[in-house]
Structure formats: structure tokens, C-alpha cells
Amino acid sequence: MTMVDEPTGTQAPEKEVGKARRRKEDARLITGKTTWTDNMSLPGMLHIAVVRSPVAHARISNVDVSAAKAAPGVIEVYTGRDFAEEQGSLPCAWPVTPDMVNPGHPSIAVDSVNHVGEAVALIVARSKVAAQDAVELVDIDYDVLPPVLRMEEAVKDGADLVHDELSSNTSYHFVFDAGDAGLGGNTDQAFADAEVVVSRRFVNQRLIPAFMEPRSCVVSPQGDNYTMWSSTQIPHILRVMLAMVTGVPEHKLRIIAPDVGGGFGGKLQVNPEEVLALLVARRLGKPVKWTETRSESLMTAHHGRDQIQFIDIAADREGNVKGLKVRLLADMGAYLRLITPGVPALGAFMFPAIYKFPAYHFECDGVFTNKVPTDAYRGAGRPEATFAVERIMDELAVELGMDPLELRRKNWIQAQEFPFTTIAGLEYDSGDYEQATQQALQLIGYDELRAEQRQRRESGDPVQLGIGFSTFTEMCGLAPSRVLGSLAFGAGGWEHASIRMLPTGKVEVVTGSTPHGQGHETAWSQLVADELGVPFEDVEVLHGDTSISSRGLDTYGSRSLVVGGTAVVKAAEKVVAKARKIAAHLLEASEDDLEFTGGKFSVRGTPGTGLGIQEIALAIFAAHNYPEGIEPSIDADATFDPVNFSFPHGTHICAMEVDTETGMVKIRKYASVDDIGKIVNPLIVEGQIHGGLAQGIAQALYEEAVYDDDGNLTTGTFVDYLVPAASDLPHFDTGNTVHEAPGNPIGAKGVGEAGCIASTPAVVNAALDAVRHLGVTDIQMPLTPERVWRAIHQGGDGGERATAGTIAWGGASTETTTGVSTDASSLGGDR
Amino acid sequence: MIPAAFAYARPTTIDEALQAVADGGEDVKIMAGGQSLIPVMRLRLAAPETVVDLTRVAEMRGVREEGDAIVIGAMTTHSDVLSDPLIAQWAPLIADATETVADRQVRHRGTFGGALAHADPAGDLPAVALALDAEFVIAGLNGRRTVGAAEFFVDYLTTALEEGELLVEIRVPKLQGTWGMHYEKFNRVAQAWSIVAVAAAVRREGGVIAEARIGLTNMGPVPLRASGVEAALAGAEATAEAIAAAADRAAEGTSPSSDLNAQADYRQHLVTVLTRRAVTAAAGL
Ligand SMILES: Cc1cc2nc3c(=O)[nH]c(=O)nc-3n(C[C@H](O)[C@H](O)[C@H](O)COP(=O)(O)OP(=O)(O)OC[C@H]3O[C@@H](n4cnc5c(N)ncnc54)[C@H](O)[C@@H]3O)c2cc1C
């Protein structure tokens, strides 16, 4: 036995913030001992299967559901006609220009279909199996129209139209001109005067969020009330939007996001199937469930990225940048979903990156095509911008014959210049680009790698080595509500939290920022443990149920800790303030004489006195003895609306081996140093960086949503949509610098997207650096071995890929479209 | 991802299995490890009336020695192949290739015979069987027959197996003399099928390559022998230059497809590089 000393009270209690706590939610998430939406089973619950369009663009000439209706176990079959009057349009909350064209987005097609996988009929059956079996029995006739698939064709005069009631395929034309905004000089003049101009066209390919848990929802009607469980990132926003779309009053709707298995922005959506499940439950008065299959998910959940980027940079011969011009074609897909138009437009503010451009002009066209809509995907707008600017900085360096890092250094914002207002009007908060860069160079062993590169070049080694940089920043902590208002965004950016002190001293923290894998429960517990001086284990974090967490704006844009965590801290401060009054009363002291440390109030200068906040919780529960004129509660809530974004930054360096004989690329080393402000939990930070790197590297090397000439998604399974596993990724050397964010009391900047935003250009720049001397100037992403080989041996950027799936069952068809397949949907692209 | 309904039989002997196939109706599918069949059924690209599951047919599992050949039961799983001493001794090329197949989970269920009967051009084992001149023992209700590897692979996903027949075992001749073997696989992520791969077995006599057998994966609808390369290598010096010159002929007579991973001309280039590497490794250079 050991003797345990009484805590002396003079020693400061160990801080929770900064501890590499293992995540308290992981045991249940990893072992599945929790409720995922698809685990739910309600008495009498019916199952929905969706019949989906096998063609990209067609008029629906006839729908025959009689055979499906007669199938065993089938309760009802609905078509678009059945819901035409009540389905409304799926919401688009971000009209980026006043004259943006929104054709409306039916949840289920009525007269025409505009992408493969669009819902055309619903089967409602007693079992999931019965519903699936009946899918093939629905007989639909399509009058096929030419599909519009390529943006550069789609914007031409006389192009085929996605929506023939519209006059063009352009949804909007968004312009930001720094000169007009009074933030910079005249861009045209800057280019006219420049000694050097470099222009490029980059393709930022279409990606699929590919979250682990497929989308799922369950709706249970009770009288005129409806409860929906959904695998969503945004239960609060979903509630408001469903009320607006379906007319079910908001107070009659309760949305619950139970544990959610990932989203990456892919579940930042009001899904057609969520609307439809609610409508079916209302029609039938019965609980219903819809869960997608993996192939349905890849085909119909919104995609991300998909831009053609025209970027021009102007500079003098010494490498001082003089201007930046950007023109984007951004693929909206067939319809506008929740923030479809806003994702590329948000990029307007990120293209100037960390550099001091004196002139800047940005234009973006949102373009309709017959593909599934695009929307938020990890980084949303920022990876696209970061990619283009970090690529063009390398191209400029080559043009000038300068070291790429030297060029960056010459133009980036200096540490002493913070806070710095950029040419795009953002006020960058804090950081030190040089410090992060120096640390990253050390981590990767830069000098040895450059020596090896030289050696391989000289010996003509078939395997060449390249080194690529990305010195990035991004904007997190979405968002100051007033700024969102000025950008015509349909909501605010505040976040809400409440803290409930239970009689036994345990603490319930309610957060409006709904997690879907990030580790909120752990991080929030660490924050509250420090603020209230209670044990980490005594804190329970509640979330995701609009009846429990009544106010919130959910999780995306690396906002949770910065905005949601701050709301928690503010609520905790209020709890302490309320408890202080009661402590003063019980200790018969003046409030001013009390100090609060380690969870205890004590009278200054009177050792031995003291009352713990957990004891106060019990005292105020009993409420036998408390001051006059206050309520018997120390619970509190807080809403935090940030005044600025936060701006993480960092330097990522990739060393890449390129096998010039085969075109195979292999990351040799990867180092990243990220400044994300204060680190609440280093383990969570490391995890977020690793996952982000995996996704950013995946864009550079592996992932691409490919459509064939008929508009079929041929990367329709994980055989052909290549999500890398740990076995395909290198070891990551990660580090941090810390410049706290001044905009929130935690000092955190946000880490959820950093790895994903920063890594893509570092990887591509590294590959190009390896083969530049062989005459290669660009390679399209993803850098498939074939593209790399072609770029080396045939010139150009590697060109388009063939679109056929690679194995027997890869490709265009799935169980939800096979039953109604047509010639245009036959398997396999151009096989 | 729910297959259409089907009847299910799980026989325990080859005879019972043949009977179950005969009795199964119009559209019967034999299931070995199910690693290729089940995905196709789950996507409803196949909807058989009856599935005959061979996992309980003990006599189709395992590897034995039979005179101048080793005999591999069709139902021997990939993971059993990997730990089998006879294969390690007489046909390490099979183990070499099997190691590159998919992941641990798939290798625990998927079978040697299933992979060959499936005859996916991107599958790794057909080219190996071809390079080793394996023989396929096929059973039907009317008895057994044996076909050589060159006749077994007929077309894209099509073999010499007739309706109602089972592949029961594969005979791999023991190679005489000192052979080096290597399987060179090219794919983008660790657990994927081959974009192109080359199976090489090389017999050296001192500084000379006496004999070489080269099988090509995914260079056409069926696995191919690189006979031009084999001819060029026979009697050639075991040097980098000689091997490279021979490997240049690897694309002769191939007709690869174009898909997401590679277009035909690139595959025809790749195969020369991979052949050079496979032969170099097999020759111990
Ligand atoms: C994720 C994943 C990755 C993979 N990666 C690779 C890879 O890298 N390389 C590779 O080569 N393969 C790969 N495969 C396929 C794997 O090797 C399978 O095991 C193999 O293709 C089929 O074997 P099986 O035993 O599962 O056959 P099954 O799927 O059961 O059957 C396949 C076909 O063969 C027929 N059949 C099976 N056995 C017999 C028999 N005895 N007689 C007659 N007909 C028969 C069946 O009717 C069916 O048509 C992968 C599979 C998966 C799921």
C-alpha cells in the first residue's frame, strides 16, 4: 500500500487541455456498440428502396408500376407524379449572385431525369429484401436526350441544354475584383505592365466523399409529429429545411443524428431521400427506413470539387508577384443542392493564399451538367484554390529560374505583419510561415533529399526523385454571421452550448455542433474539465438530437472547436459565475473575496475554507439555502458568434519517386508542419492531419469520379474509385507551430481540413519536380501511372483516361438501375 | 447489395455436387469462395436460380504429390496455397502470385480453382497456371477429362468448363532442373487486381538461360504465353542486355483492353518493362 498525500491545494491541478487523451467515444464507435441509423428497427417499420434512372438525360414517357405493386410484401409504389404537388424543391441556401439561375431540384423526378441515379420511383415494402426485389419490376420508358457532360462544351453558344426551359447551362457568373472592392490595384494594368506572365489551365477533378457509413434515415410519425433519425452532419439545419420544403411545421419535427460514421461534407446536405422518407411516412402514417447501398452512395450522394481552373500570375523578373487572375468553370451537376454554388465561389477569398498580391481578379461560372450535383467535400473551395495557387507558384518559379521556396518566401506575409488584410479582404489572424517552413525542412531532411535528387539525375536513374512544396493557409471557424449575410448565405455561423450541472456533480454538456467522428465528446470534456475543475470522466457530451440540443448549426468548415468549443467555454464561465454567488452565500463571504481554482471556491487568505462546484450543484438542487433574488440553478447556456474566421497555415513537403519506365509514382517521404493555434488534444490533431493527408494525397494520386460518354459513372464501386488504405500511404512526419488564434478564448484555429487542403499540390509539385528535366510541365490528377508515363514520353498532361471499368463487375450498373437498364446504360463505359 | 432470391445446395462430395448442379434448374452457379460470385450477385448482375456451394466438399481441398506432378484441389484456398510446402518446393511461382491477390480476408475464402474457373483477365493465377503448363481436371456426370491450360482459357470470363461440369483439381508438372521464378505485378493500390503482370520461370545453366516460360496477365481476354520472349531467351546469355532485348518482344500478339487503369498501347509498353523485371528476378540477376 502506498500513502496518498492529500492534495495540498498549492499545486496547480493538471490541465486537461493539451493532453493526448484517447477519445472516449472510440470504444463504442469502433466496436459498433452504439446505434447507427440503419440499426434502428421500429415496430411496423416499412422499408423504402429507390428505383433510379439508368440514363443521364431523358424525358420520362411512361411509368408502369403495376407489376411492382403486385409483388410480394410491397405496400405501395410511388412515382414522381404522386409527390409532384407536395415535394417542393430541395433547398439551395447560397444564391451567390442575385441573378443566379436555380431550376429547382425535385426529390423525385416527375417528367425528366437529369443524371444517372436520379430517383424515379419508390418501393415501400414490409422488408428491405421485398423492396429491393420489386425495383426490377418497375417499367419506365425514357426518351433519351443528349447528355451534357463537359463544361467547356456546355458553356458554348448553342450547346445542348441540361434544363431546356433555361436559356443556357450557366447558373451564375460570380465576380470578385479587388480593384473594384478598393482592396488592390487594377488587375489588367498589372498584367499589362508585368515582365513575366504565366498562364495555366488546371483540372481539379470530381471526387466522391466516400464516407464510411452509408446514408440512412428512419422516420417515425406520432400523430402530426415526426421524428427522423438520419446519418447526417446537420440535424439542426435539416430540421429547418425539411420544415420549409415539406410544410411540416418545424415544432412538429424532431431530428436525431445518432452516432454518424463520417461525412467529410458529404452529409452536409438535405438529401432527396430524407424528404421522400418524410413524405412517405406522412402518407402512410407508418415508420419507414431508407438505407443506401455502397454503389447507390457512390452514384447519388453529392460529389465534390470538379473545376476547370484558368489561372494567370504576373510578376517582375526578380520574382515579386504583381497580380493574379482566376477564372473558374465549376461543375454544379444537374441541380443546385444546399451549398452547391457557394463552394467554388468561396474559393474567391482563398486564391491569394499567403502571398501579397497587389492586384487580383476572380471570376467563376457555375455550370450545369447531367451529373450528380457537387457540394461540400472536405475543404470545400479551399483545396481547389490552394491547389491552383501552389501549382502556379511552382510554374512561375520555373519560368523565373528561381527556387520555388525562395519565390514563396519573397512574396509571403511576414510574421510581424499580422494581422494582415489580404487583397481578398480577409484579415489573417496570426502565424509565421518561415518558422513552419524551417521546421518542415528539418523534418523531411531536405538537404539530403536534394543531394540524392542531383545524384539520380546525373546517373540517369530510371527512378527519379522530386520535392514539392505547399505553403498554405485556409479559413476556418465558419463563420461570422454578418460576413455570411454579406455573402448571401442562408444562415448564420454562430454556435450554441449549454451546461447542465447534475445533483451528483456530474456535468452534461449540450453542443449544437454535431460530431460525425471528430472526437467532440473528448475535446469538449477536456475544455469543461479545465473550466469547471471537474474530472474529465464526470463530463458527458450530448449532441445531435434537436429535442436535447435545441439550437445549433452543426459541423463543417473546421468550425466545431473554434466556434462550438468556444460556446462551451462561455457557458462554463457562466456556470462558474452563477456558482460563485451561491458559494459566497454558503461560505458567508463576499463574492469578490472568492477565488476559483481546481473546481473549488475558497476565500482568499483563508486556507481550509472551500466549496467545490460539484457540491454546489447538489446544494442548489436541494435549494434549501441560496441567496434571495436569484434562480436556484447554476446551469447556463451560451451562443458564440465569431467576429472573424481563423486562419491555420503550414508547410507541407513531399518527396516523390517517379519510375520513368512505368510512370508509377511513390511517395518517399512526407513532412507537414501545421499551425492550427492552440492544441486541445494532440492525439485528435494528429488523427485529423493523418486523415486529411490521406484524402489530399488521394486526390493527387488515386481518386476520380469518371463518367463515360453516356453519363454513366464508371467508377461506381471501390474497385475503380480508388480510396487508398494505410498500406498505400507513406509514414507521415508531422509537426506543429503554435500561434494562437486571437479570435476565440481557446486560441484554436481548426484542423479538420488542413491536411486535405495542403497536401494535394505538394504531391503534384513533387512529381513534376522529379520529371521537369524530362520536359514535363503538368500532369492531370489523379497521377495514374499511365498519365505520368504519357506526360514523360508523349508530352502534354497525360490526357484523358479510358472510361471503362476495370473488372467484370465494375462500372455503370447497380442493383437500383439494372432492372430498367437501356442501351445507354449498358455496362462498362467504352469497353 | 441484396442478391435476388436463389435456392441453395451444400453437397459434401463431388458426386453429390454434380448431382446438385444437374438438379438445380436452368441457371445454376457453382460457388467456391464466393469472392467473385457474390459481388456479382449482390449487384444483381447475376441472379442464378440455384447456388451450389462447394465449401463442404473436403475431397476438393489440399495439395498432394502424384508422381511427376503436384495436384492442387480446386477448393484449396489462397491462404492454404501460401503455406503449402509442396507448392513452395515445386511451384513457388504460384505462391508468389497468390501473395499479391487481394487482402487477407479475401485470401482466406477465395480459392485457387475458383480464381481459375472465373478466368478474369485481370486475375493473377491464370497466367501462372499457363506458364507452368498446368492441367485442369474436370468432372461431369459422365466422368472426368483433362485439358491443358492453353485450351482451358477460351475467352473473356469463359473456360472449357461445360454446363454441369466442375473443375476438381489442377495438376502442375514438377519442373526438372534448377528453376528461378518470379511474379511481377503492376497495380495502383495494394489490394487491387493486376493492370498488367508477368509470371516468369527461368532455368539457368551457368551463364546461360536454358529455358524460360513467361505468362502474361491482362494482356488480352485470356492469359497469354510470351512465346517470342521465350524463344529469344532460350540459350541466351543471362545478361541484362540479352534479357532486355528479349523482353522487348513481350507485346507481340497481345490484344489488351483499354479501361480506367490503362489504355491498350500503355499496357503493351508496360508488359515489356515488367517482363524484363520478372525475367531478371527469376534469373537471379
Ligand atoms: C476485394 C477483392 C480483391 C481481389 N483482388 C484480386 C487480385 O488482386 N488478384 C486476383 O487474381 N483476384 C483477386 N480477387 C478475386 C479472388 O482471387 C477470388 O478469390 C477469385 O477470383 C474467385 O475465387 P472464389 O473461390 O472466390 O470463386 P467464386 O467467386 O466462388 O467463383 C468464381 C466463378 O468461378 C466458378 N467456379 C468456382 N469454382 C468452380 C469449380 N470448382 N468448378 C466450376 N466452376 C467454378 C463460379 O461459378 C463463379 O462463376 C479479389 C477479390 C476481391 C473480393
Image: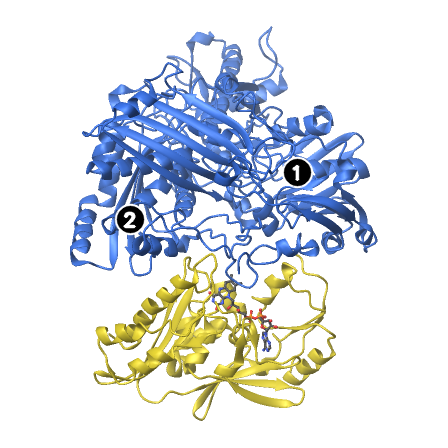
Chain colours: A blue, B yellow
Is residue B7 something one can see in this rendering? yes
Q: Is residue A110 above or below residue B67?
A: above
Identify the element where label 1 is drawn: helix
Q: Residue at x 77, y 47 (%)?
A: A63
Quadrant of the image occupied by residue B58: bottom right
The residue identified by callout 2 is A776
x and y percentages locating residue A413 in the rendered image? 27, 24
Residue type, label 1? Pro
Check if mark 2 and mark 1 are on a common chain. Answer: yes
Seen from the viewer's position, the closer of residues A87 and A431 is A87
The residue identified by callout 1 is A272
Seen from the viewer's position, the closer of residues A276 and A433 is A276
Q: Report crowding for label 1: few under 14, some 14 to 19, many 20 or more residues within 10 A (C-alpha).
A: many
Q: Is residue A205 above or below residue B125?
A: above
Q: Report crowding for label 2: few under 14, some 14 to 19, many 20 or more residues within 10 A (C-alpha).
A: many
Seen from the viewer's position, the closer of residues A507 and A438 is A438
Query: Which quarter is ligand 1 in?
Result: bottom right
Q: Earlier in the sequence, mark 2 or mark 1?
A: 1
Q: Tell me the quadrant of the picture where the N terminus of chain A can be found.
A: top left
